[in-house]
Image (cartoon, rainbow, N blue to C red):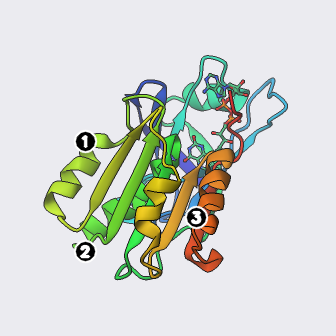
Amino acid sequence: MKLKLISKKRLVSNIKSFTFKPQRPIKWSAGQYLIYSLSHKNDDLRGKMRFFTISSSPFEKNITITTRIFKSASSFKKSLDNLQIGDTIEAKGPDGDFVIENPKKRLIFIAGGIGITPFVSIIRQLSFEKKPINITLLYANKTKSFLFKNGLDETAKIHKEFKIHWFLSPKKIDKRTLGRFTKNKRHIFYVSGPDPMVDEISDILKLLKVKEENIRQDYFSGYKKV
Ligand SMILES: Cc1cc2nc3c(=O)[nH]c(=O)nc-3n(C[C@H](O)[C@H](O)[C@H](O)COP(=O)(O)OP(=O)(O)OC[C@H]3O[C@@H](n4cnc5c(N)ncnc54)[C@H](O)[C@@H]3O)c2cc1C
């Protein structure tokens, strides 16, 4: 399917969002992703295709990608950044099972940096549907520029059941922190971020005797550790 760029903006530091209007309406569940293909000249070894979570929520109908654009960005991201309003990109999907099944259960969302994107989509959709947000968000970031901070704080003010804990580096989401949430065996843990972070947190959760079936993972593969 074709998506037409209708807006792009810088959110914080090197993070930008790109919003597209689909050629025909797309149905998706908050937390899912699309596979995008952007033809461009002189593509590098990473090629012309990428996975990106849909950071907008289904009620918004348009598709937003939220991503980091480094100075040394890949050829894909440079050409994404160079798109002009009205330009189009190809996409396939939606796909992915990083979605919530039972909003009545207490969910523990654990985000590393840009890994916040599926959570924001889910939380905003619940808020739009006026459903309770039975979620505790643990959000770790390397800098003070926590993505979507204002919106998340606003939501937490309205929904008293929604709790947020911020972890600014060097503060980490460690075993001690996670241990506070693993005592209740009915909690479901969702972990999203770069591969090493998702693996590290999942290993700690397993050490803390959380059953594998209660851990959901979203690997943002492709970000190298620097
Ligand atoms: C299911 C799924 C969902 C995903 N959702 C998202 C999403 O919502 N948002 C998102 O951004 N990504 C998401 N990703 C990851 C995405 O697909 C890309 O792999 C990732 O963004 C890296 O993009 P890139 O290869 O174009 O490299 P770039 O990000 O352009 O990086 C290019 C180069 O920049 C350099 N670099 C890397 N890190 C740093 C750093 N910290 N400082 C300076 N330079 C650096 C490195 O040399 C790197 O090779 C998702 C992946 C999957 C599988």
Q: Answer left or right for 115 relative to 162.
A: right
Identify the residue shown where x is 42% and y is 66%. 181
Residue lying at the far right of the rendered structure: 45
| Circle 2 crowding by C-alpha within 10 Å: few under 14, some 14–19, many from 20 | some
Q: CA distance from mark 2 to mark 3?
A: 25 Å
Residue 196 pos. (x, y %): 68, 46
Question: Callout 2, which amino acid?
Answer: Pro
User: Under tag 1, what secondary structure?
Assistant: helix
Within the image, what quadrant is residue 98 found in? Answer: bottom right
Question: Callout 1, which amino acid?
Answer: Asn
Q: Please give the residue where the numbered disc 2 appears in the rendered image.
A: 132
Identify the residue shown where x is 68% and y is 48%. 195
Label 3 or label 1, whichever comes before in sequence order: 1
Q: Quadrant of the C terminus?
A: top right
User: Under tag 2, what secondary structure?
Assistant: loop
Q: Quadrant of ligand 1?
A: top right
Q: CA distance from mark 3 to mark 1?
A: 29 Å
Q: Please give the residue where the numbered disc 1 appears in the rendered image.
A: 150
| Circle 3 crowding by C-alpha within 10 Å: few under 14, some 14–19, many from 20 | many
Residue 18 pos. (x, y %): 47, 39
Residue lying at the far top of the rendered structure: 71
Residue 162 pos. (x, y %): 26, 63
Q: Answer left or right for 147 relative to 157.
A: right
183 is higher (above) or lower (below) than 13: below
Residue lying at the far front of the rendered structure: 176
Q: Please give the residue where the numbered disc 3 appears in the rendered image.
A: 205
Q: Answer left or right for 66 relative to 202.
A: left
